[in-house]
Amino acid sequence: MNKIITGKNVVKTYGEANVLNGVNAEIAKGEFVAVMGPSGSGKSTLLFALSGMDDVSDGSVMFCDTELSSLKEHELADVRRAKMGFIFQQPTMLKNLNILDNILLPAMNAGKKDTAKLLQKAKALMKKTGIDGLENRDITEVSGGQLQRAGICRALMNEPEILFADEPTGALNSKSAEEIMDLLANLNEEGTAILLVTHDAKVAARADRILFTKDGNFVFELSLQRSSGMDMEARVEKVLAQMAAVGI
Ligand SMILES: Nc1ncnc2c1ncn2[C@@H]1O[C@H](COP(=O)(O)OP(=O)(O)O)[C@@H](O)[C@H]1O
Ligand SMILES: [Mg+2]
């Protein structure tokens, strides 16, 4: 079983509108897949459907060999907390907690009790992502890039098998964006699968594969396997050409 996520004929309807029109998607364990497409083409909806954050109107989503719709609500919440991490354009941190406590929250919510071990893990993640020293800062006292790093630490606290990222660099300047992508690429090298939505060709060019969406379905798949030996510039060129062809 080497698939971590399998979406079969996934349909999502809001009222009269079919936002996802029977999407088939497979993400392999450890794979890095990017999703690109025009605004409103259903990218975020797809991420929510494939991560079980939102239910689907028809079709099925499997995490490894578990059909998400077969799970009770608390079982689904457990799978999401233990196996999946989420990163958004703006991390939604709690205002009344400092950076460290925000990072610790998912582990606390998962019922983990060994506080010393959790603290050690949170601090190690903060060091790894370059925000050690900011433990006691208020979330309003750090930069956008630092807050996003904290969001990544939070997403990694429970050692997820897959990270879902919805435009994680969308609010960052290009230097911060590149640093965040270096981090995500490292995590992927270490084995974490990534499904990432982006508008940025440089960000998407890091992926193994790019899925292009239009009107609620995939219209093209671009393979950028690392083994192909292309340098980053050539990869970005390929992505830009495909974006133009798809009309993004
Ligand atoms: N909760 C919702 N209720 C109604 N319509 C929604 C909802 N979420 C998304 N939509 C609609 O679904 C379409 C796709 O949205 P979204 O997945 O956010 O697109 P993207 O992320 O590609 O910009 C849009 O037309 C949007 O208005
Ligand atoms: Mg979106």
Image: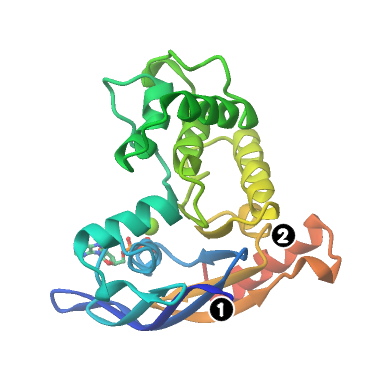
**Is the residue 175 above or below the residue 132 in the image?**
below
Q: Which residue is mark 2?
A: 236
Which residue lies most toward the right here?
229
Nearest-to-viewer mark from 2 and 1: 1
**Amino acid bearing label 1:** Met
Quarter containing ligand 2? bottom left
> For residue 229, what is the image quadrant?
bottom right
Q: According to the image, what is the colour scheme of the structure?
A: rainbow
Determine whether the residue tagged by mark 1 lies in a helix, strand or loop: loop
- Please provide percent x and percent y for residue 201: 63, 57
In the foreground, 145 or 190 = 190
What residue do we see at 27% from left, 61% from top?
75
Separation of marks 2 and 1 at Cα, in angstroms: 32 Å
What residue do we see at 39% from left, 38% from top?
107
Determine whether the residue tagged by mark 2 lies in a helix, strand or loop: helix
State the quadrant of the N terminus.
bottom right
**Is the residue 234 above or below the residue 212 in the image?**
above
**Amino acid bearing label 2:** Val
Q: Which residue is mark 1?
A: 1
- Please provide percent x and percent y for residue 167: 47, 51
- Of the image marks 2 and 1, the number of the one nearer the N terminus: 1
In the foreground, 122 or 208 = 122
